[in-house]
Image: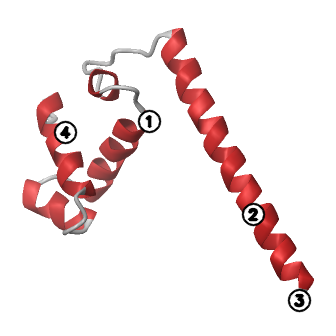
């Protein structure tokens, strides 16, 4: 028989992300203090940053996104990718000048 997976409440995840983004400690240090893996805390951080509200960040129990939520998430992602692309264009032009 395998060990059961630990389940964390939405409040725990939100507080963990808040501590990780506070800035005084690294994400790894916060994860160690809370007893979670750093990659798990990093995933929670990405979920929290990509959500419109706290309730959307951690739907729990396999709750799937609605179509509007998915569209909003994709629009945010497209905007971020456009900003990154524009930055890279400017950097390439800067280094090409030399």
Separation of disc 1 and disc 2 at Cα?
Answer: 22 Å
Is label 2 in contact with label 3 (beta carbons under 8 Å)?
Answer: no
Is label 3 in contact with label 1 (beta carbons under 8 Å)?
Answer: no
Is label 1 in contact with label 2 (beta carbons under 8 Å)?
Answer: no
Quadrant, the C terminus: bottom right
Q: Which residue is mark 3?
A: 98
Of the image marks 1 and 2, the number of the one nearer the N terminus: 1
Q: Which residue is mark 1?
A: 50
Q: Quadrant of residue 65?
A: top left
Badge 2 element: helix
Of the image marks 2 and 4, the number of the one nearer the N terminus: 4
Separation of disc 3 and disc 4 at Cα?
Answer: 47 Å
Q: Nearer the viewer, mark 3 or mark 1?
A: 3
Q: Which residue is mark 2?
A: 88
Query: Taking 83 as reference, is 30 left or right?
Result: left
Give the x, y percent position of residue 24.
19, 69
């Amino acid at each position: 028989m395998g060990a059961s997976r630990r389940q964390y409440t939405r409040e725990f995840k939100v507080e963990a992300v808040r501590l990780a983004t506070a800035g005084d400690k690294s994400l790894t240090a916060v994860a160690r203090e809370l007893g979670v893996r750093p990659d798990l805390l990093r995933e929670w951080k990405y979920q929290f940053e990509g959500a419109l509200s706290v309730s959307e960040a951690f739907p729990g129990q396999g709750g799937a996104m609605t179509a509007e939520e998915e569209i909003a998430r994709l629009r945010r992602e497209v905007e971020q990718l456009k900003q990154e692309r524009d930055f890279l264009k400017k950097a390439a032009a800067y280094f090409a000048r030399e």
